[in-house]
Image (spheres, coloured by chain):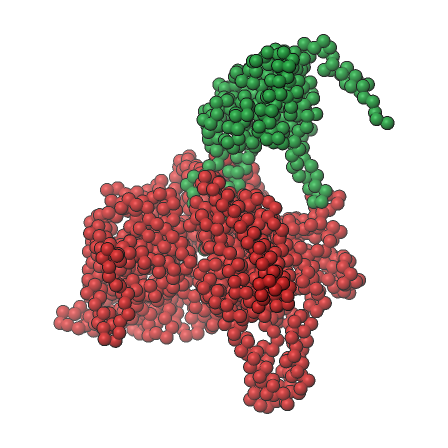
Chain colours: A green, B red
Amino acid sequence: MDLTTKYLGLTLKNPIVPSASPLANEIANIKKMEDAGAAAVVLESLFEEQIRHESKELDHYLQFGAESFAEAITYFPQASDYRIGPEEYLEHISMAKEAVDIPIIASLNGVTVGGWIDYSRKMEQAGADALELNIYYIPTSPKLSGVEVENLYLDILKAVKAAVKIPVAMKLSPFFSSLSHFTRRLDENNVDGLVLFNRFYQPDIDLDELEVIPNVILSTPQAMRLPLRWIAILYGRIKADLAGTSGIHTAADVIKMLMVGANVTMMCSALLRNGIPHISTVLNGLQAWMEENEYDSVNLMQGSMSQKNVSDPSSFERANYQKALQSYRPNV
Amino acid sequence: MSRLKVTIDGNNAAAHIAHKTNEVIAIYPITPSSDMGEWADHWSAEGKKNIWDTIPTVIEMQSEGGAAGALHGALQSGSLATTFTASQGLLLMIPNMYKISGELTPTVFHIAARSLASQALSIFGDHSDVMSTRQTGWAQISSNNPQEVMDLALIAQAATLESRVPFLHFFDGFRTSHEVRKIEQLSDDDIRAMINDEHVFEHRRRALTPDNPVLRGSAQNPDVYFQGRETVNTFYLQTPKIVQNAMDRFAKLVGRQYKLFEYFGSPEAERIIVLMGSGSDTAEETVEYLQNQNEDVGIVKVRLFRPFSIEHFMDAIPKTVKSIAVLDRTKEPGSIGEPLYQDVVTAFTEALDGDDAKFKSLPTIIGGRYGLSSKEFTPAMVKAVFDELKKSRPKNHFTVGIIDDVTKTSLEFDPEFDIEPEETIRAMFFGLGADGTVGANKNSIKIIGEETDNYAQGYFVYDSKKSGSMTTSHLRFGKKPIKSTYLISKANFIACHQEVFLEKLDMLKYAVKGATFLVNTHHPQDKVWDTLPRQVQEEIIEKNIKLYVIDGYKVARETGMGGRVNTIMQTCFFAISGVLPKDEAIAKIKDAIKKTYGSKGDEVVQMNFNAVDKAVENLHEVEIPDKVTSTIEKPPVVPENAPDYVKDFTARIIEGRGDTLPVSKMPIDGTFPTATARWEKRNIATEVPVWDPDVCIQCGKCVIACPHATIRQKVYDPKHLEGAPETFKSTDYRGREFPDMKYTLQVAVEDCTGCVLCVEVCPAKNKKETRLKAINMQPQYPLREQERENWDFFLKIPEIDRRQVKIDTIKGSQFLEPLFEFSGACAGCGETPYVKLVSQLYGDRMLVANATGCSSIYGGNLPTTPWTKNKDGLGPTWSNSLFEDNAEFGLGMRLSIDKNQEFARELLETLRSDIGDELVDAILNNEQKDEADIYEQRQKVEDLKKKLEKIDKPKAKQLLNIANYLVKKSVWIMGGDGWAYDIGYGGLDHVLASGKNVNILILDTEVYSNTGGQMSKSTPRAAVAKFAASGKPLPKKDLGLIAMTYRDVYVAKIAMGSNDVHTVKAIIEAEKFDGPSVIIAYSHCIAHGINMAKGMDNQKAAVDSGHWPLYRYNPDNRKEGKKALSVDSKPPKIPFEKFAYMETRFKMLTKSHPEAAKKLIKLAQEDVEYGYHLIEKMADILDGKKNGQNGNQ
């Protein structure tokens, strides 16, 4: 049985890839992922903003109160070197590369064009097999048009593509007015893959403190429906590889995602919830299903249920919505 | 051979040689010598080696006494060992110094000479400390400037190894230890050439070793001790020659020739001055000037003070000398003269002997004192001394530099006398500590020193406050060597880095004609003239000053620099001064930025680069109109209604004219009135809290948290609102205990530091706009006038009757008047809320023994004190003895009070028939257990005093004299962890074991805060501190547990930010306990590298993580069969890491030593789990005892 798949020009031994999560911060976990059968690993994002913040914060607090009082001209011992910035992340890439044989995909979340280019280059030099650009951008300004927002993504892509030779994937949110059109523009600019979709962590309200608080909610299988639809729609229309992410928890989820056209499926919440060995459970499930249903390769199922290849393409469109509503029978 | 030119200060220069020529360095922090130890530690941590290619071991000890002991051991065991210290630290080393010299042990101690604490502590420079050790048998060698510090440190090292006599190498604290100068750095080859390894081998051969066992340190008896003492004579006789030989060898090697006594001046001088230390440079500069004026004068710089070589001294004196002034930078009350004077007189007297004597009769020799506690010593003063020597009967035992209008010792001098060479550029920069001015100027002087062929000097003056403190930088540079060891008084360039100074300070009085004035102002170039105060305009016109302006605030904001205008103003200085071509200067500034900030990431470097570029774009010259247009006047220094004492004395110090106060204005015994901080309206907050009565729930949390007592609440009868200013806010009181009363929360906006702690702790949110609370920060300036009026009105509303208040609640305790207010502590200080709370609860009958440290500085540093008194004139009385003896000092207070009280009670019984049974019994039987009892007792004691006045018996007079002791007094021993865990621990332990009723409040910041963040035994594992640069490897000492082992000691661990009710309760229980109580109070601190506004959150996290479990151990409970130990915080609910990484002290380790950080944070987690488990189990065990399982009592 052939489980291999192609993603970002890399041949992966199967279509299961842990997506960016804190789990990959430990080399031991990356090793465990490989042992459990993961085909590649996406590292947690390097946040340029955080590096900038840490650098400024360290500078601020190390000199806060200094040179103000004759007895305490400084408050901290001097250190000739601080590991500020991407060094730790870059070292992590190198160590991960050394520890495992599977491809390592570095993930970058930048805030400036300079940062995107600089860190991408460094990640490539550190040995990353590919890059995933994670653009976490909430366009709050009413002055910013949709085209301007899209151009921002395109500019980053162009800059990074020009800076590195390794493949570049882009992780997108679903919030574009014309996703197909936008993905075509990305495709024209040689994006190597699209990761659909980014789950923005939405803020919550603490009613006791009357404060806005971050509240991470792990994905549920329902979250898969959105990328499932869009991968189905995009499959065959663009050159870029497609990675399905959000809500992939079981072998069935993986199979569905592959069938609509995903090159790979990415898991995060399922691993956080069930542990890294869950990868082998899903992988075993995939194999069992393929065996039972006589699929001898992943390639065979990839795209088989895409919009292009299904008998009723409208089922991925508005018609499907109407049907869904009609089929819903309220429990009264 | 060309040597590296470096621009460094004296401390750095001394440490360079000490680190290169030693193997063991034991230190203890003390200003102004701390930096030397820190340099040594830094270099060893970096792996820098000494000249024998091994890294010196550096250890921080628990006190200077400890450091001396460790060194004695290291030296006796064959190591080359050294230390750095000053002042009281040196005094603590004296016992060991006798041993070290008695055993002829070579070593050099480097001393940043500092005043001794006498009528007051002073951190500043003079020779009182080193002169107190002149009898110890140590050689004493004096350096006058940073170059000499490096040179003579090496010469002393070479000489001690050869002579076996230990050396004290000293230089003036601050003036030399902190003066940055361009000097030539001695290379390793130079050092190797000076140190004879054979002498090192000899030292090692004398080491104590079981391979060659000996006994050293015996006890001797009358038969031989004396003879033994005389054995060392030959060594002392040889030492001067050995030193001179070393100086001569050094001269051949390096080119700088030193002499034991160095003469400078006219070969035919009739008048000379003999002195040592940094003043010698100024004296030399003045002699040069006077010689050019055809005056035959000269000076003798004393380098080797001990052993004093009469022969070398007399060689240095020109034969023509007729009169000599000997200047001592110390004071020896009751002596016939200060040490150097006495030695010079003796030397001359002895030198008269013999046919070939240089002098046949004694010249006139007078002695004088100068420069105590870094008092300025200027050419004008040198000239005054020379002028005095012209007189037929010059004043002996004079002083110079002060006005002594009591014993008339002082010489008059002309403050306008100025001899600084025109070609030396002199620049002064006025900044705030927080704006980074000093750091930038240190970089500037480094650039000028190392990148140009100029000589360069930088000296920096800080004020005595820790919040909103002002700094003045004095920079000199030019083609001529700089000998001016005094502050600049005539400047070519003056920079005002904060526009608020324009109204407060007369900066332009320092400006020479045609000087340049650079002002940071938010006013545009074309409008700025009219915003300048009248006096400033006048001076600009009169002195033809060039005015440049920049809106540095805007540039800082736009470039992300926040409040730090340092780089911006530095760039402007270079752009205007022309010391370097502009482009070259900018390139050099950027290089310096890379060096300073490079390790902290590109972001910070880039931010500073942007600031440099933007500064040039925004710098403008202002065209000066020909007439004064301004009506803005300098506001009064203190309010008009301030007491006369404050106006006459305190105000002069506040406005920087303390030097003009004559002796008669000073208290004779160091006693000052309290209640003075309230008159020093510092107006340092840009934003202040503003109360919203509609949202407020009147909980009092903001009041208890306020570190500066600037936010207060009162509950009062509505009638007191009569005459209230229009904007005065008041609302109905919400509690049931005071029906129909009004409530006001008032802020003293002129005293507030703007720390935001109050807003952060406010639990009430505005329901309509949740970003708002019951107090919200608003700009201070527009509110200043109005709130000044409101504050004054608020103060007039009567304080609540203390008997009516539930003092064990937050709300109740916060109705009590704080008797500790407006201190100079850091904005957002974590210590002062505890101090203030204690003052609210017990201030009216409290004595404070305060260990030296932050609390003694913000509590007792002139000009003002935050300790204050109530309307009846009652309040805390405060004193600071030393750092190491504070517990004992407080115990002494208790003993005295108890004795007096006992005596008073005895007298009451004796006079019973005269006074009457009823009053005597009422007084004797009042337990004074609460405010009502205390009130009652005070009344009765007043009645008693009235009666006693009428009783004509000696015993009645006795009782009248001590009757006030019949009112209960509360003794509070306060200090930081450096005192309690380290230097004062022995005494603290003894006091805990004394059974006496003292209350010990340990303000635990887990680090030496006042001296700049050195590790103490309270520092937790994994935290970075000085001397623990790679993270403290071992856990903190559990002082609470140790104290509990005495069983009859009340112990509490508190953290206001976690549980303020617990804090109040613990303090009340501690005070109530009739025996020793110790309260260990978690105090967040600027030395933790935290957002001080959120300090209370850090406290909460410290408790939540288990790092700081809250508990109370009350022996009274045990006696009553109740639970003795109550653990009052929940088991750890967040990982230690979560708390720790809120703070730079822990977090920086993840950036500087990531592997160590990972290891240590795990161990620290184990520490907190162990600690909590231990205290919890102990509580169970003690509870078990209560049930009789293990037997009680």
When the figure is inspected, residue B704 is found, relative to residue B938, above or below; the finding is: above
**Which x, y percent locates residue B1034?**
46, 50
Q: Residue at x 76, y 63 (%)?
A: B737
Which quarter of the rendered picture does the C terminus of chain B lie within? bottom right
**Which x, y percent locates residue B1165?**
53, 46
Residue B309 left/right relative to B91: left
When the figure is inspected, residue B784 is found, relative to residue B909, above or below; the finding is: above
Q: Residue at x 62, y 15 (%)?
A: A290
Report the front residue among B437 and B211: B211
Do we see residue B582 in this rendering?
Answer: no
Q: Give the quarter of the image for residue B4.
A: top left
Do we see residue A298 in this rendering?
Answer: yes
The total of numbered circles placed on residues is: 0
Q: Residue furthest right?
A: A332
Report the front residue among B369 and B1108: B1108
**Which x, y percent locates residue B231?**
21, 67
Q: Give the quarter of the image for residue B1178.
A: bottom right
Q: Residue furthest front?
A: B1189
Q: Residue at x 63, y 63 (%)?
A: B1187
**Which x, y percent locates residue B852?**
48, 62
Q: Residue at x 83, y 22 (%)?
A: A329
Residue A24 left/right relative to B56: right
Which quarter of the rendered picture does the N terminus of chain B lie within? top left
